[in-house]
Image (cartoon, rainbow, N blue to C red):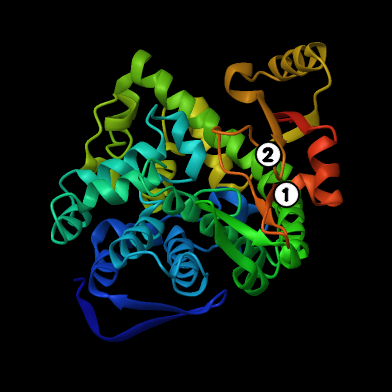
Amino acid sequence: MFKKTDELKVMRDPIHGYIHVEYQVIWDCINAREFQRLRRIHQLGGTFEVYHTAEHSRFAHSLGVYEITRRMVNEVSGLKELSEMDKVTVMVAALLHDLGHGPFSHAFEAITPVAHEEYTRRVILENTQIHQILSGVSEDFPEKVASIINYTHPNDLLNQIVSGQLDADRMDYLLRDAYFTGTSYGNFDLERILRTMRVKDQKIVMKESGIHSVEDYIMARYHMYWQVYYHPVTRSYEAILHALFQRMKDLAQTNPAVLKDLKMFLPFLKGEDTMQDHFRMDESAALYGFTLLSESEDAIARDLARRLLDRDLFEYKTIKCEEDLARIKKEVAALGYDPTYYVIHDEASQRPYKPYKSGEGHNIYILREDGSIKELSLVSDIVNAIVKGNLKEDKKAFYPIG
Ligand code: ZN
């Protein structure tokens, strides 16, 4: 039913060796303008300011999530038996799951109240090249793809492949981010995980003999969060992005004339953005905007934009109580800065794995030799220790000292 490409298409990839494409619809989506846009958005936002080789794009990550999904539906017993329609739908959803990201990922959400998942849905369902390609399969195909990204597809296995606690998205970004930051924390044995993955009672499960590879994956998550994703210097860069976006938002209300040359940001600041505005808003546009802002007549916007471009970042301190924060605000004000934009409070906390109560989300399940399944933390002492241990939290203030 699905048209195949004339020959197997392959793309070299440092994580997976090759990305393999045999369906025309996948190939067409890769070549669509909305997917090509992902080349202009870093996978790790401002992390390249800390790990200087973390320059990989959402384009590369999206291909990787597609490739892991393709292997899951071709190699895992229980998924191999899915219909061709389900297989292609989930492969397309994996490829397109990050389409809605704006520049600098979550920091951009300070400028628009619309979450990236909602933009992803809109790119799939509204008037775009991607929508045209998907509608060419069948009228309801775009909806089917979007429902996996919303976790509402009637075949729950498909939702679990793209977004569970051991899903193609997380597996690709951990391996890819570890590779491109040059850290080894994120490495785990993807081959072993794919070999020991099964399906039982409409759940993706892991054979007990593969438990060590899953433990390793959980530990990889734990280390990547604290060594890479929550690195304080990355957070300092993001704090300044946040402050600058906030300043622009405030200027749009109080002194919009200052922003008149910033056409790329204006529709978002006014809440009037169209899909075309979203398409144009990538990191090259944002960085050009920062260059313009670094010469702005508004002193705060000018200084914050210059700091981003020159990597003149804020210092940081761990905050233990409200008084710590109040004291820093006073010191910063005494230096002549407005604490609204120059003291950014940020809290990071993370559990690498959290078992949900039934119905709340997808757990990782272990398939025991007697055929029963058990939630991971009940079988693994290592994971149990993480689940039972205190939630690791880090509260910091980011601010200039001179
Ligand atoms: Zn992703």
Which residue is painted at 36% across and 55% down in the image? 93
**Quadrant of the rendered image containing residue 194:** bottom right
Q: Report which residue position mark 1 lands on.
A: 376
Q: Nearer the viewer, residue 230 or 143?
A: 143
Tell me if label 2 and label 1 are in contact, CB under 8 Å: yes
Q: Identify the mark nearer the N-term, 2 or 1.
A: 2
Q: Residues within 10 Å of mark 2 (few under 14, many from 20)?
A: some
Q: CA distance from mark 2 to mark 1?
A: 8 Å
Quadrant in the picture for the N terminus: bottom left
Q: Residue furthest bottom?
A: 7
Q: Is residue 367 above or below residue 376?
A: below
Query: Who's the residue at 27% across and 31% down the image?
Result: 267
Reply above or below: 11 against 129: below
Q: Residue at x 82, y 44 (%)?
A: 384
What x and y, as percent, mark residue 136? Answer: 13, 60
What's the amino acid at mark 1? Answer: Leu
Residue placed under numbered mark 2 in the picture = 355
Q: Amino acid at mark 2?
A: Pro
Is any atom of residue 46 visible in this view?
yes
Is residue 370 shown left or right of residue 267?
A: right
Q: Find residue 160 and report its horizontal and vertical position in percent.
A: 49, 50
